Amino acid sequence: MTRVAPLSAEEIADPELKALIAEAEALGVPDDLFPRILARAPAQAVPLMRALLMSHARGNVDHQLKEIMRVLLARFAQDKYFAGLRSNKARGAGLTEARIDAGCFAYEDDGKGFSEAEKCALRYADLMFLDAKQIDKAFYDELKKHWSEAQIMELGAFIAFHYGMQMFMRSLGATAPIAPADGT
Amino acid sequence: MSTNPDAVDDALFGELRRHYSDDEIVELAAFVGFNLGYHTFFGTLKFYPLFSPDGRLVSQAESEALYGAAPVSLNKPQAAE
């Protein structure tokens, strides 16, 4: 039970929002709770849903890496809702819970098999809301060794947007409707 | 939400409801979430306001001189761990 009740599916008439909800349910992130709450602010619901889906499932950065980053951020945000959701697309491509946990808690460990580019991206997500002052020119210079400027902007915007929406759901007291299935 | 998310509780929502509808609270919370995410990101990019306090369009170098070497968004307390 969230602090503000979501609209029922029947109360949502906007065909664009309904299509985005269907797209999100196929992806698995978010489920219908997030858009049914957002639907209370109809001017915001469609663009925010579109941005959430596009930033996560499209673009020029590997979706599995962004799924790990998304869970890392949700755990840091203490948002049980988004932390408990998993991308069916990433899981279908072979992403396991063990890999997600390694990416959240031990990505710097060479034995975990993350590339230097992946480590740098995960560090970017890790530091953004832990200590943004560490994301300085030297940090961006290191990012540029592994990623194009377009990819860095994609990563940064992804981190910023998903963390913001995770804090939104945390503020509403949302919990995950189901425990994340073990994909191992 | 930004500096002390643990304080966003039922009591705060009760107080919000004295002034805003549930629809307005959702709009506010989404706005705050969006901005706390993006302004932290923008702060790391170290870019500065396009306008001076008196409304002149200024260069990034002049803006940095006006507003300081460290972006304001990085000087606030960080979100709780």
Image (cartoon, coloured by chain):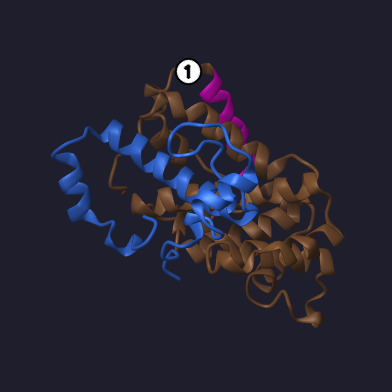
A2 sits to left or right of A122: left
Mark 1: few, some, or many residues within 10 Å (few <14, many ≥20)?
few
Q: Chain of mark 1?
A: A
Please name whichever residue, B58 or A150, is drawn nearer the observer in this view of the structure: B58
Q: Is residue A24 magenta?
A: yes
Give the residue drawn at x 34%, y 38%: B28
User: Measuring 32% from the left and 64% from the top, which residue is drawn there?
Assistant: B6
Q: State which chain is coloured blue.
A: B
Tell me the amino acid under the disc marked 1: Asp
Report x, y in % for residue A7: 35, 31
Residue ID at (72%, 68%): A99
Q: Where residue A169 sits: x, y (%)?
A: 41, 49
The residue that appears at 56% across and 52% down in the rendered structure is B65
Q: Which residues are magenta?
A: A16-28
The majority secondary structure of the magenta stretch comes to: helix
Q: Quadrant of the C terminus of chain A?
A: bottom right
Chain shown brown: that is A
> Could you tell me if residue A31 is visible in this image?
yes
Q: Pinpoint residue A20: horizontal percent, then vertical percent.
A: 58, 29
Q: How many marks?
A: 1
Image quarter of residue A134: bottom right
